[in-house]
Amino acid sequence: LKAQIPKKQLNDALNQLERIIPNRSSNVALTQVLVQQAENGLTLSGTNTETDLEIAIAADVESPRAFVVPAQLWAQATKTLPGELVELSIKDSELTLSSGGATFKLQTGEFESYPQLSFPTHSDVLIDAKELSKSLAAVRYAAATEEYRAVFRGVQLELLPNRSRVVATDGFRLAYRDFAASNVTENGQKVVIPARNVDEIVRVLRDGEAKLTIGNGSLSVLTDRARLNVKLMDGELPDYERVIPKSFSVRLKLEVARLRESISRVAVVADKLSNNRVDFIVAGERLQLVAESDSGRAQDVLETTLDGDPGTTIGFRAKQLLEALGPMEGEVTVDLGASGAPAVFRASGDPNYLAIVVSLRI
Amino acid sequence: LKAQIPKKQLNDALNQLERIIPNRSSNVALTQVLVQQAENGLTLSGTNTETDLEIAIAADVESPRAFVVPAQLWAQATKTLPGELVELSIKDSELTLSSGGATFKLQTGEFESYPQLSFPTHSDVLIDAKELSKSLAAVRYAAATEEYRAVFRGVQLELLPNRSRVVATDGFRLAYRDFAASNVTENGQKVVIPARNVDEIVRVLRDGEAKLTIGNGSLSVLTDRARLNVKLMDGELPDYERVIPKSFSVRLKLEVARLRESISRVAVVADKLSNNRVDFIVAGERLQLVAESDSGRAQDVLETTLDGDPGTTIGFRAKQLLEALGPMEGEVTVDLGASGAPAVFRASGDPNYLAIVVSLRI
């Protein structure tokens, strides 16, 4: 084999593969990158048995030959190469990388022991890659991290004939984002992607179109550049629509950046034992934020427009508020109900995103 | 008390104090900042019993009164304040911070239980603060980190009538940097500063002049802005001058940035079991860098000017080379001797700095 590849592209592909490929494994084959010939160049693939990733790189290839080579070492070597073009060649069992006067010779692995990876050849649903990536990234924080039923530790992908959505919840807060999808089947589909696999999908998605195929316990995402299989969870989220409040006792509108800043500020003295509670005290067209603990008390005041009951006091966990507001821009609409009831957050900057945070009981 | 302080200055002082003041301690008093009146404003001080730091802040102060307040909380609150000017006031046992509409009320601590800090009122030696800071920062890496005699885990400060120097060594490498000092006593003084205390001195030093006083087991550094006491170690470094080679078999001159880059590059495949060995192979006016291990081999070539034996091969630990070259700029002169002998590194960018690395035996 002999091939020339722009260093930036090779670096980029190896960095992404390195995240998935285990650095150490009782199965040494899994620590390697598989290189194969493709239509216009090469594909680089890796797997950790939970996630498979293949990335295509355009290149001129002479005497193509598939091989495997340790992923981490190849990635590190490529990163340090001085030139802009990397020349790959294989002789016997040695891969030579040369670029700008520097040379690496790396021992290749046993090609035969590498697991067979397969990606779907057809795909059903089409989604704008940026929209899908933005949606997954926006709701991922709301998935539970531990000590919850497995299904809460993932993001539910809903491909329904009337609308498509990703949604995550841990039972105390919820986030969803809607987006457009083509070729959704008539009956629709709901699957739950483990949160760590959501991160891999987000990293793979760039421009263009993403093609989704739901297989038997796995989701495949295909783009022009990459093909990804991730494992899915069993089951689906319980009906969450019924916890979304339909009415509110007071609606506030204020600048989301200012609100975030203000929450972070007063949370400095919030009491850890009471979940870093921050209180919203609505007093006419002013929202007062207050937090306190044995060590002190903090207070800040924001201008707001107000619709509804002007004498409300409601507490939240500071961290949950900050995470819910994280993906928002522009002006946020906050719908508050009674103490202990869910509050709803929507922003002018992205009407497809909605966040719910359950308020604390007094 | 009532005072107005620019937020930036207050922030800056609290950040530096926060690094020294323990976040938790069986002696709660130690987790606090002490605030006292000074000539043109306030001083903020803290201690961890190993290091005492006092920082002066210019401010208009009404009805001055000394107090103590939890350091971490005050620092965090100040960081989040929206305005540019912070108003401090004390009522009963509560410190109020107000700025740009936000308010914090923090419980002050027991002033009486705070330890008495004392800083020298006179000082002997005068050194340009930037020079001292640059010198300490340049040699600090060469101090031993563990499993060595205590004295190797510090930086030796030498204030001698003919020259002043900081020097650190772990027995396998050595770094020193010379600088100018005024009012050095006739007999000279050598003291060893523990490495972590060196870091605190570097952080405190800025512009202007540093005044040094060596007391009983402690060093005091005074500047216009700050006063610092740090504990010293017992003893001094063994005579290191005699290990500095006086002759060489080959002298190379090359660009230090290129050399560093090249060492990092080939070190990617270096064998961890042999100390990440990188070989310098001198072949005429070219320096070849080579590293290898079971997983592969890397090679890079640099142009160099050469004086002496053109057929030398010498190995080093990659990390030691990179650390020795770290503080250098411009062109580096490398003096190589026999295998296993020390090599000397000097750079055109800073002739006051010298580094020695013992080469590996073949």
Image (cartoon, coloured by chain):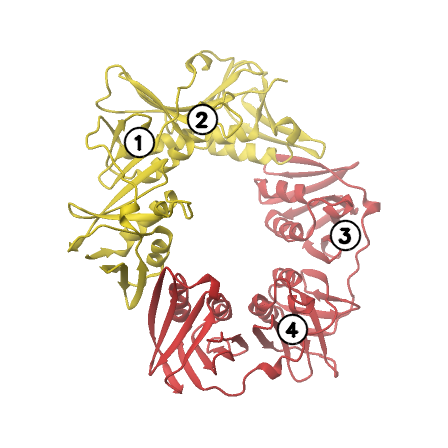
Chain colours: A red, B yellow
1 and 2 marks on the same chain: yes
- Tell me the subunit letter for badge 2: B
Q: Are marks 4 and 2 on the same chain?
A: no
Q: Chain of mark 1?
A: B
User: Dot 3: what SS?
Assistant: strand
Q: Residue at x 35, y 51 (%)?
A: B71
A221 sits left or right of A170 in the view: right
Residue A127 on image: x %, y %: 65, 73
Q: Which dot marks residue A127? A: 4
Q: Residues within 10 Å of mark 2 (few under 14, many from 20)?
A: many
Of the residues tagged 2 and 3, which is closer to the observer?
2
Q: Answer left or right for A348 relative to B70.
A: right
Residue picked out by circle 2: B332
Badge 1 element: helix
Tell me which amino acid carries mark 3: Gln
Q: Do the numbered discs 1 and 4 sit on residues whose CB atoms are within 8 Å?
A: no
Name the kind of residue labelled 4 in the image: Ile
Q: CA distance from mark 1 to mark 4?
A: 60 Å
Q: Looking at the image, tell me whether mark 1 or mark 2 is earlier in sequence order.
A: 1
Q: Secondary structure at mark 2?
A: strand
* B321 relative to A143, above or below: above
Decide if residue B208 is in sight here: yes
Q: Position of residue B214 (x, y in %)?
A: 28, 26
